[in-house]
Image (spheres, rainbow, N blue to C red):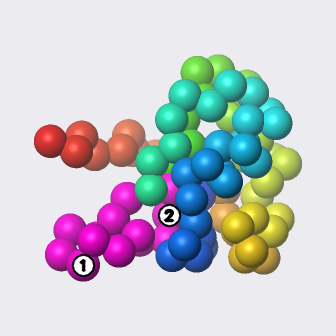
Amino acid sequence: SLLVRQLPPDARAEELEEAFSKYGKVIDVYIPRDYYTKRPKGIAFVQFPNPEEAADAERALDGTTLCGVENISVQVALQKRKDPS
């Protein structure tokens, strides 16, 4: 999975999927929300089945403009996303 940081609060999973799917098949896009406020945290996890495609997306999109924000951060997620249950 890739961790995307510095996203605006109104970023949509569909926007991210469209941008990242140019580099391979996207399995899932998850935008975590704050437990108490229910507002997006400004990050997202984008999951690819293929590590090479994820690496291509990381190289291509890190530091670019996405969802109206310049210089977003895209990196390999060090942890798996938390189980929503």
- Please tell me which residue is depicted at 73% across the width and 35% down the height of the picture: 21
Q: Is residue 20 visible?
A: yes
- In front here: 24 or 58? 24
Q: Give the magenta part as a residue range.
A: 32-44
> Dot 2, how many residues are within 10 Å of its Cα: few (below 14), some (14-19), or many (20+)?
many
Q: Position of residue 32 (x, y in %)?
A: 37, 59
Q: Which residue is mark 1?
A: 37
Establish if 63 lies above or below 78.
below
Residue lying furthest left: 85
**Corner quadrant of residue 6:** bottom right
Establish if 3 lies above or below 18.
below
- In front here: 57 or 36? 36
Q: Determine which of the numbered discs, if any, sits on residue 43 in the image.
A: 2
**Corner quadrant of residue 48:** top right
**Count of numbered marks:** 2
**Corner quadrant of residue 53:** top right
